[in-house]
Amino acid sequence: MAAQFGRRLRKGATTTAVAAVAVAALSASQAPGITAAPLGGGEDNPGRGAPDTQLSPDTSVTGDSPYYTDLPPLRTPDKPGTSVNLPAKGPTESGIPATVLAAYKKAEQTISASDPGCHVPWQLLAAIGKVESGQARGGKVDANGTTHSPILGPALNGVGFANISDTDDGAYDSDTVYDRAVGPMQFIPTTWAAWGQDANGDGEKDPNNIYDAALAAGRYLCAGDRDLRQADDLDRAILGYNQSREYLRTVLSWFEFYKNGTHEVPDGTGSLPGSSTPDSGSDSGSRSQGGGESKAPATPHSPGPSTKPKPPESKKPERPGGSEKPKPTPPPTTTPPTKPPTTPPTTPPEVAPVSRVENAGTGELTAMAGSAFANKITARVKNSLGRGVARQEVRFEIIGGTDTRFEGGRKSVILVTGADGRVTAPVLVAGEKVGAFVVRASAVGKKAPAAEFAAKVTPRAADTLTRTGDEPLTAVAGTEFATGVEIKAAHKGAVASGVGVTATLLKSADSAAANDKGPHFKGADGKPVRALSDLTTDAKGVLKLPKLFADAQTGAFLLRLTAVGGGTVTIELTVTAPVPAETPAG
């Protein structure tokens, strides 16, 4: 900040002290969600703002241009023994022009939808608009929100202000030698080039349009993943606008004042600040060859409503303070100005309301055929700042050749995200077709990358097989086993229906190979079969094996049944020799 500008602020020391009292008093009526804290740090108050809110060496939004130092109206409390002036709701000062107020509230709504973690209140935008331009010169805007004439700060030629040589070829500020702060929210051209918005949908990003400027200011205040409910983040955001502790206190004073209550007034009738005008109007004299005016410092008014009469209407563009514009003062040197090196903006010019849809911690998606998936799919919609987007519709759709469906038999569903941008799909129910497929989660109506969730259906399984009876399984050689074999399958204690089972007559307990003699099943051709693989449990998890037959081989034999999923049971079979026929007595 230039020395002359610093002197201007020191002249407002009395006002600063009053601001400290004003904000402290207003904090008692703090708006919901805002963290109260002491005022910004400095020589007179080193508490808040140190060290996290040290002034940045980077150029501020306004180039540290002048601003109105007026404070909210004050009153003396009626309680006996008190003498501290406290802020009061002024019927004039609390009125905000209709279009300007609508722009602030629309900016808050837009940012709340795309960047809900920032929590930018419209009253903060109103406070900055008050000190930067007197609410767009008392609301002198057209129906679209554009000021009747451009609002320009003085040439930033280093004479009392920052020294910023022209960066925009005069595109925004009509000055091809030096930059100037532009519009009701006073953006310097480089900052507007990075943060400018088209909030009113006219296809242009106009710093002199209050809708565009208010949204751009809100986006800027939210930069760096700030949460403006936190005092430190709030300080940093305001100091990024104008790197002055006194500016911070002034904005906070109006912020608290507007949170205590405002009302809408017609456009063009808003209260004008009583201190001298920080903007240089729009006439050509103030913009010729960088000869911007070198203004006297803005003078704070005394407590209470200003008694200064409004200036008469004139054909020249009006200035909020109504004072006569001094003639431009040339730079203090005749040496042509040297354009300083500029640092390109490192922040994106736009905040994409929806940047991507991503997996929000969904677990493994695997289920056995015919059963419900244990994990549900959870997605999160984020903006380009990485914050969740609330109230965004998300379509979940099953992709691939599968008969798996969401609960209720649906192949796709549309749900809305919550406050943190998360949304959870209904339960998936696996069909009978095994194999892999994908569930895609996409933001409805947005060209943002979708999230894809890999899922898999495995065959029905049983981890336990048990025989349903306990009768001995015996047969005489060359005959049929009188008792049939029946088993029941379970998976994690529940009935396992439709599970594939193999049955094998073993050579021995230590071998999985099928025997070549002894008990057997019969194939369709009547020949012995000692291994079956096309068996399936019924709806109750029960499997009845085909009839078993014994050949001439006698002894003990083993039948092993194995289910998909690992369940096994081994059953012993016994074949005895035929009883010899009795020989008739001779």
Image: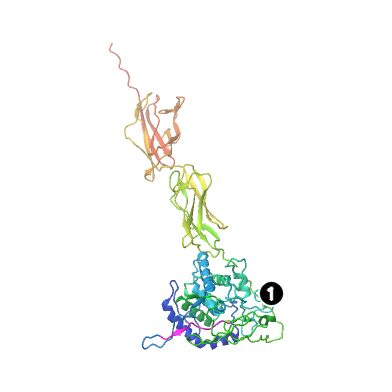
Of all residues, the one furthest to the left in this rendering is 585
Q: Secondary structure at mark 1?
A: loop
Rendered image quadrant of residue 174 = bottom right
Q: Nearer the viewer, residue 256 or 560?
A: 256
Residue 80 drawn in magenta: no
Q: Which residue is mark 1?
A: 169
**Depicted 536 relative to depicted 290: above or below:** above
Rendered image quadrant of residue 147 = bottom right
Q: Nearer the viewer, residue 44 or 52?
A: 44
Q: x, y (%) of residue 466?
A: 36, 39
Q: How many marks?
A: 1
Res 249 seen here: yes
Give the side of residue 348 with respect to residue 476, left or right: right
Figure quadrant of the C terminus: top left
Q: x, y (%) of residue 456?
A: 49, 47
- Neighbor class of circle 1 (other Cα within 10 Å; few <14, some 14-19, many 20+) is some
Give the side of residue 144 with respect to residue 420, left or right: right
Give the magenta-colored segment's residue range.
Answer: 66-76
Most frequent secondary structure within the magenta stretch:
loop
**Depicted 371 relative to depicted 278: above or below:** above
Of all residues, the one furthest to the top in this rendering is 586
